[in-house]
């Protein structure tokens, strides 16, 4: 075909060129949204939006550059999905708390099938409320007191394993040690299982749990879903991309059904853990999983009558395994890293522990009396928050504090940037537990520190994490000293994805006290 006297262009080629230009114009129009609304932000790259910077710099570095440059609300694009990075405390409160009925759900960029929709972090609206109501009571203070001796048993194992490695002043890669501990804790406290991961750090529990939490957004499949969200469902049907790493789902299906079968055979109702709550809420007579009702209360009560399905139980058990192992061990690793880099802080912690509890195991009450330990862990979670970002999907057009937020916007709190805003955190990259004295905390606005998120979707495991990390640190500081060595990387390089994970592990020299 000849156009305007140009050489012949084959028809298929012409169609491709037209398609490309149509898509270009479509994405360029999408990318003009924040400019049209007057929200500041970097210029988006054709098609990819601002994904390129995120991929090159990493999510945390990208956000830490954008927030000081553009302020409390920054308009960017993940592909063509409009994203508002919000660090303004008043807006955070309005969106994540007061207007949580509009901002109930997370943004799910990939095609999630019905099974994955049963997982609390992906589930939506009344379905999420139902699942949350069952998982929420897992870590009440009564339950935490009940599991404390079990956690202490893992602390004793932790000390023994380190002691074996330390003879002769060892340099230890901390992920295996910290991961072994957190895996043992989550298995014993949530599932009544002995995973023995401290002693066998390469066992199946550890290997498969590593593949549960997705961190890297910049993968071709995700990028197509973000650039052309309308293709999400088509992509889901065309490519059966596994929800998790190879074999991961099947492994946990087997584990969960085995534990549940054993508990049912033994008819033992004395357990008060996560898996027992699931058994109690289980749908024993399948009544179909789709709930169709108009009224919100009716929908919730229909879910309650239906109970938890097998898929829901497995998916939510996997969140416990994944977060319990991975996120918590990263936090403990970063804590040991900061101990090694700050000998004076380490000695202050030792003195506090020695004065309050000596060489004994802590009680629930004595853990709370260790104020400097609390300040130390808070500072670890500020500088090394497990998630660099948390988000909510905007269900419908809404105006919040005079700001128009269109339906479909991904409202994101860039946690790593929020935790480094210099007005609230002077000299933000410095590790300084003094930021968390009562006096200093009172000087900062609420919602300037959110390691566990906020509002109705705040982290379910928060209280367990704080207790088990403090207990591990108490045991580790009571018995050993931690120092940096030639293999300790300063500053520590991180993976570029959504989770704060050290890129090359954490190597620390450990000595007996
Ligand atoms: C250092 C460890 C951990 C950190 C820093 C952490 C942090 C977070 C954050 C920031 C969120 C998102 C909250 C929001 O969107 O507002 C979250 C959600 C969640 N966390 Fe954690 N978490 C940790 C460990 C755990 C553990 C051990 C468990 C379970 C035993 C757990 C269970 C959950 C669940 C179920 C959700 C989803 C809640 C919902 O959607 O309703 N987390 N966590």
Image: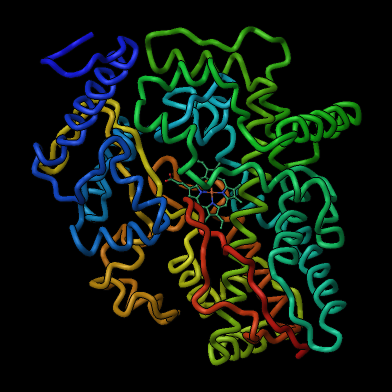
Between 222 and 325, the residue placed more toward the observer is 222
The correct choice, above or below, for 205 with respect to 508 in the image is above
Between 474 and 266, the residue placed more toward the observer is 474
Between 361 and 174, the residue placed more toward the observer is 174
Question: Split into 4 quadrants, where in the image is the N terminus?
Answer: top left
Image point (69%, 10%), residue name: 286
**Residue 383 appears in which quarter of the rendering?**
bottom left
Is residue 6 rendered to the left or right of residue 210?
Answer: left
Between 54 and 326, the residue placed more toward the observer is 54
Q: Position of residue 200 (x, y in %)?
A: 86, 58
**Residue 401 appears in which quarter of the rendering?**
top left
Is residue 83 rendered to the left or right of residue 32?
Answer: right
Question: Split into 4 quadrants, where in the image is the C terminus?
Answer: bottom right
Is residue 21 rendered to the left or right of residue 435?
Answer: left
Q: Position of residue 373 (x, y in %)?
A: 55, 77
Image point (33%, 36%), residue name: 79
The correct choice, above or below, for 227 with respect to 448 in the image is above
Q: Position of residue 138 (x, y in %)?
A: 62, 43
Q: Position of residue 132 (x, y in %)?
A: 52, 34
């Amino acid at each position: 075909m000849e156009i305007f006297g140009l050489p012949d262009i084959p028809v298929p080629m012409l169609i491709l060129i037209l398609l490309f230009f149509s898509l270009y114009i479509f994405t360029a129009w999408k990318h003009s949204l924040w400019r049209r609304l007057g929200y500041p932000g970097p210029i988006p790259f054709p098609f990819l939006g601002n994904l390129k910077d995120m991929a090159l710099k990493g999510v945390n570095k990208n956000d830490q550059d954008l927030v000081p440059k553009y302020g409390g609300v920054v308009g960017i694009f993940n592909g063509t999905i409009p994203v508002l990075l919000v660090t303004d405390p008043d807006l955070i409160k309005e969106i994540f708390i007061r207007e949580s009925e509009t901002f109930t759900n997370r943004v799910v960029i990939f095609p999630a099938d019905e099974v994955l929709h049963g997982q609390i972090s992906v589930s939506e609206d009344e379905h999420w409320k139902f699942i949350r109501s069952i998982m929420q009571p897992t870590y009440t203070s009564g339950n935490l007191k009940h599991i404390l001796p079990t956690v202490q048993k893992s602390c004793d194992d932790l000390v023994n394993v380190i002691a074996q490695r330390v003879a002769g002043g060892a340099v230890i890669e901390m992920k295996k040690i910290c991961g072994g501990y957190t895996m043992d804790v989550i298995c014993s406290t949530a599932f009544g299982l002995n995973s023995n991961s401290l002693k066998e750090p390469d066992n199946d529990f550890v290997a498969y749990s590593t593949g549960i939490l997705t961190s890297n957004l910049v993968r071709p499949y995700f990028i197509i879903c973000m650039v052309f969200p309308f293709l999400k469902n088509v992509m889901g049907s065309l490519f059966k991309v596994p929800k998790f790493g190879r074999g991961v789902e099947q492994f946990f299906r087997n584990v969960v059904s085995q534990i549940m079968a054993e508990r049912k055979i033994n008819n033992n109702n004395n357990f008060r853990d996560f898996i027992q709550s699931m058994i109690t809420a289980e749908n024993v007579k399948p009544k179909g999983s789709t709930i169709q009702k108009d009224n919100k209360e009716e929908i919730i009560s229909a879910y309650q009558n239906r109970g938890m399905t097998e898929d829901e139980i497995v998916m939510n058990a996997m969140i416990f395994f994944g977060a319990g192992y991975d996120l918590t061990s990263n936090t403990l690793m970063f804590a040991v890293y900061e101990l090694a880099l700050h000998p004076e802080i380490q000695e202050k912690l030792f003195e506090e522990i020695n004065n309050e509890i000596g060489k004994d195991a802590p009680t629930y009450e004595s853990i709370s009396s260790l104020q400097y330990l609390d300040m130390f862990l808070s500072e670890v979670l500020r500088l090394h928050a497990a998630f660099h970002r948390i988000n909510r999907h905007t269900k419908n057009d809404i105006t919040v504090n005079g700001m128009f937020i269109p339906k479909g916007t991904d409202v994101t709190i860039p946690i790593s940037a929020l935790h480094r805003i210099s007005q609230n955190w002077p000299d933000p990259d410095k590790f300084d537990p003094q930021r968390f004295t009562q006096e200093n905390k009172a000087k900062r606005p609420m919602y300037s520190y959110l390691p566990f998120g906020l509002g109705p979707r705040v982290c379910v495991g928060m209280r367990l994490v704080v207790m088990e990390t403090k207990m591990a640190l108490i045991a580790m500081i009571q018995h050993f000293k931690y120092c940096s060595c030639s293999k300790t990387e300063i500053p520590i390089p991180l993976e570029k994805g959504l989770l704060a994970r050290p890129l090359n592990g954490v190597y620390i020299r450990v000595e007996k006290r």
